[in-house]
Amino acid sequence: MKHYSVMLKEVIDNLNIKEDGVYVDATLGYAGHSQEILKRMKRGFLFAFDADELAMEHSAKALSEISSNFKIFHANFREMPKYITKKVDGIIFDLGFSSPQIDEANRGFSFMKDGPLDMRMNLEQKLTASDVVNNYSLNELVKIFFEYGEEKNSRLIAKKIVNVRQQKNITSTLELVKIIESAVGAKYFNLHHPERKIFQAIRIEVNQELESLKEVLPQAIDLLNKGGRICVITFHSLEDRIVKQIFKKYSEVDEIFKGMPQIPQDYQPKIKLINKKPLLPTSQELQENSRSKSAKLRIIERV
């Protein structure tokens, strides 16, 4: 099962892994980052999270070949504070989807292969892409497509979906792609690829990706030991904006206390930015893995 971990060297270098440290892989996937973390530890421990049981099974096997010093939780990373009750030395968030997930047609993530409208990371979850496409109101679809997909023809596409589903349920990924194309016309479709944006929007809605990120990042900062680090890899502007804003907020003095000679401990910055601008993949990585082209890595350290 081929999986390529994006910006692997940069993440591992910037985590400053200690032999006896405690680390969290918030997005285990197919364990590319976790394997490298485990290799560098002797007495340390790794906690990992994933909503995808198939990925967990694969990763548990791969990690156990390196060490037994790990525990995997079948949970969304937003539940991290429930499971991690002691301070940790580093946390990695890789917000991309694993290649096997995208490439497996029956998971419904791909707009290039025919499969059911699913898109669930956690297969035990009730809400699917089919529910969104067939049951959400016109205005709800427009909102999702516009906010999560940043697609200017959101209303046009949503109207077409509503019209089609009045005749019959929309059941497959390629059926949805054809509906998107018929809504915007072949010229716009081939030039701007709105299907990418619409699939992204539906996936974000199904898995509550942005809400989970907003919720967990401040809590993740509080879990860090002094000197501990968080590395976050994002793959689109919506994610990156959230990470940038939260990191900015916690790395600056509260507006109320700016300019004061002494700032109360509770209101001093919790973190420092390791890189003001995000790190980007090297040209070599871009050649090896085209899916890394939109990746951005932001790193902070607890102070």
Image (cartoon, rainbow, N blue to C red):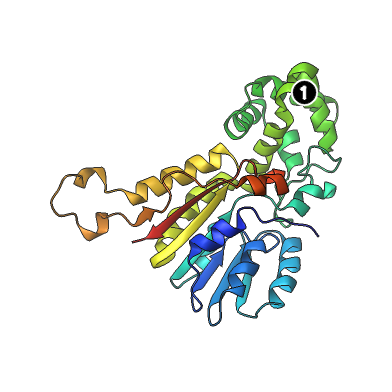
Residue shown at the point (60%, 47%) measured from the top left: 282
The image quadrant of residue 51 is bottom right
Above or below, 228 against 284 in this view is below
Query: Horizontal and vertical percent for residue 259?
Result: 16, 44
> Residue 82 or 167: which is nearer the viewer?
82
Query: Horizontal and vertical percent for residue 222?
Result: 40, 62
Whether residue 83 is visible to the viewer of this picture, yes or no, is: no
Quarter of the image that includes the N terminus: bottom right
> Residue 100 or 264: which is nearer the viewer?
100
Q: What residue type is labelled 1?
A: Asn
Residue shown at the point (73%, 27%) measured from the top left: 193
- The residue labelled by disc 1 is 190
Element assignment for label 1: helix
Query: Horizontal and vertical percent for residue 158?
Result: 70, 25
Residue shown at the point (40%, 59%) measured from the top left: 301
The outermost residue toward the left is: 261
Query: Horizontal and vertical percent for residue 125?
Result: 70, 54
Whether residue 61 is visible to the viewer of this picture, yes or no, is: yes
Above or below, 204 against 72 in this view is above
Above or below, 176 against 31 in this view is above
Q: In this view, does 119 lie to the left or right of 238?
A: right
Q: In this view, does 51 lie to the left or right of 47?
A: right
